[in-house]
Amino acid sequence: MLSPVKAETPSPRKQATTRGRGRGRNAKEEAEDDDEDSKQSPASPQKLDTASPSKAEALQARKLKSYTQYANKSPFPDFARPTAEECKLAHKILASIHGPRERIKQEDLQAPSNRAGCGDSPSVLDALVRTILSQNTSDKNSTRAKLSMDEVYGGSDQWDAIVAGGEGKLQKAIQSGGLSVVKSRVIISILRQAKERYGKYSLDHLFDATNDEAMTEMLSFQGVGPKTASCVLLFCLRRESFAVDTHVHRITGLLGWRPQGASRDETHAHLDARVPDEDKYGLHILLVTHGKKCDECKAGGRNLGKCELRKAFRGAKLRGEAGKDVEEEEKAEVKKEEGEDE
């Protein structure tokens, strides 16, 4: 049996450095960030929606530069956690609690008709649209939006009808999912670009692309960030990619697997470089499941010493001043996630 993992507490200098990385931007820069995976207020996406072409292009360039800068490597090279052993221990513990998670065979993969899902489709374009609908909302709300969209347009994947109907019609169809103004713009923009580039509504050529090529093309669409692209890569294209949503970001912070204050994009780059490929699929799903179901690890949960995962990594949470910052992160997550369904 593997023994509990004790964390090495970073030096004050390292703590200050990593905190600075995550907190160097002001509120205005956060609002302008083209990262749909961050929990934003309704006002922020509206700013993005009315951005000038030159401003939108600048945001896209910044997003792509950020990805290429840290593709296949961590933005925190001196932060040596998690180790492969820690990943496998966490995977084992979570599988014992929630059951193992394994990919279904490619030939058995079908787009679900009763939920939006997150990249669960044999069609790359459909997987991308479904994942966009899931941004910044609960599974229940994204499913409502997807079912409403299918009803309005007479079925799934009615791309011609969606484009012909315009943003206003799509916005009304998906309004139950939240941020419908932005999502309708993003979806129609992607559909138009796919048709212009390839003569048809399809991105299935990405099945033959490398991971970097697929990520770069998906990130080239405004409104698609690393988390969304990573989900499509993981679930639809069946590649090894470690997507970071709000639950993964929160729990890896509790376990000390990321620098304190690291953004979700930084956390994605860091964990994608450190989590072994064979653990990425199962560990991602199990962390999301655990973040929804564990009373101690969900947003606002208190450490009562009963969670097997937190007990195994009980020395991981940063102490002292850094520990206070972790608590502030947790409080912020609670405010951002109010109203989220399990």
Image (spheres, rainbow, N blue to C red):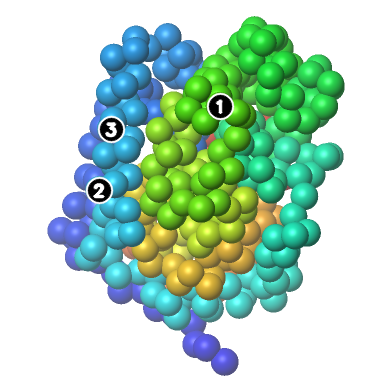
Mark 1, residue position: 199
Q: Nearer the viewer, residue 281 or 84?
A: 281
Q: Position of residue 337 (x, y in %)?
A: 58, 36
| Residue 57 x/y as whole percent | 31, 21
Q: Which mark is residue 62?
A: 3
Q: Position of residue 100 (x, y in %)?
A: 70, 71
To which residue does mark 2 refer? Answer: 69
Work out whether mark 1 precedes mark 2 in sequence or the reverse, and give the earlier one.
2
Which amino acid does the dot numbered 1 rest on? Gly
Q: Quadrant of residue 112?
A: top right
Q: Is residue 146 above or below residue 303?
A: above
Vertical comparison of 185 with 107: above or below: above
Q: Residue at x 52, y 77 (%)?
A: 88
Q: Residue 218, image x and y in percent?
A: 46, 38
What type is the residue that disc 2 sits on?
Answer: Gln
Q: Residues within 10 Å of mark 1 (few under 14, many from 20)?
A: few
Q: Does residue 137 show up?
A: no
Foreground pick, 131 / 199: 199
- Using the image as rendered, state which of residue 42 and residue 305 is in the foreground: 42
